[in-house]
Amino acid sequence: MNSLGTGMNAVTIAGVGLIGGSFALALRKAGFQGPIYGVSSPATIARALAAGVISEGLPLKEAISRSGLVYLAQPIARIIEILPEVERWAAPGTVVTDAGSTKQIIVQRAAEVFHKAHFVGGHPMAGKESRGVASADADLFCGRAYVLTPLPEQTISAPPVGNLLDLVRKIGARPVVIDAATHDRVVAYTSHLPQLASTALAAALTGCNLSKDSLLTITGPGLRDQTRLALSPFDVWQDILSTNIDGVREALSTYIDELGRIRELIGSPEMREAFKRAETFAQELRQGRKECYEK
């Protein structure tokens, strides 16, 4: 596969970390043979070259001017910052997408600045606890949902969206096309709330009136599972939370209300129904994931 679609015979990965590096490896595994240019720090570029993740490291302007597909995998604030430069340096018809975990502000900014290049927002629902290009994995996206959030005037049949839909399928992911506002509200519940619930649980245990030794000793795997996300560093989440404030606050309010109801139900027969509702959703979630991997 020398080309990814009309004019997409070379790719720029801006931000060659876990997601950007995995995207490059997934393209190679899918058969893409064209050049993949990396834009990152010198140390990251050196590691990416040594691992065969990219073909060449270049400055952003030079890389974009050579590419038919530009993949922005930096932190959200950086993506928003460089969108005007990407449009300025891209050739007409270049397809630009991103991997930001929130979409509304990115898509709004892209709609303002993009005219000759084509921007389609993206968010792969995949990741690892480890970061950096050393953790990049060609199979990271396999079986995972990959959200595309087109600009308001784009339709699903428009070539930029259609090309990316085909590409997402080629790397083994399941494309989901929704608008940016809906995306941000959904991930506030499915991604951002789990992170903050885990963070709050771990923080609560540091503030309770029990010795740390007893908390660390008298414990089972459940607490370790529930606090796994609390290991995530704040610098990863700062941009995500600050660009989805309303959605996150709504999700937290819903969760806090449910915790309040459960607190009142303790010791009552009605608690059984709360457990049953939760069990049903948890089973449906796991069955859905299993079916996705089997398809």
Image (spheres, rainbow, N blue to C red):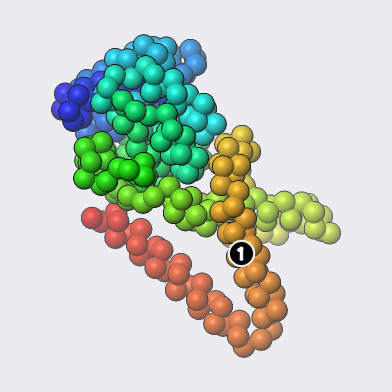
Return the residue found at the far bottom: 269
Which of the two residues, 106 or 211, is positioned nearer the viewer here?
Answer: 106
Tell me where residue 21 appears, x and y as whole percent. Answer: 38, 28
245 up-or-down from 208: above or below: above
Q: Name the residue under label 1.
A: 255
Q: Seen from this angle, which residue lies furthest right?
A: 209
Q: Report the number of discs.
A: 1
**Residue pictured at 32% horizontal, 43% vertical:** 153
Question: Looking at numbered disc 1 in the image, what kind of residue is underneath it?
Answer: Tyr
Residue 214 visible, this orientation: yes
* Relative to 149, 161 lies left or right: left
**In front of the other: 173 or 77:** 77
Q: Which residue is drawn at 45% across and 24% down?
A: 84
Q: Label 1: state its secondary structure.
A: helix
Q: Where is residue 141 in the image (x, y as percent from the top left)?
A: 34, 42
Quarter placement of the C terminus: bottom left
Residue 272 or residue 252, whichever sits in front: 252
Image quadrant of residue 236? Answer: top right
- x and y, in percent, of residue 270 in the image: 60, 85
Q: Which residue is at a point 27% across and 22% down the rendered structure image?
A: 92
The answer to whether residue 86 is above or below residue 290 is above
At label 1, counting other C-alpha atoms closer than 10 Å, the crowd grade (few under 14, some 14-19, many 20 or more) is some
Res. 169 visible in picture: no
Q: In which quarter of the image is the N terminus?
A: top left
Relative to 3, residue 141 above or below: below
212 horizontally vs 285: left or right: right
Task: Name which residue lies at 59% across and 52% down.
Answer: 246
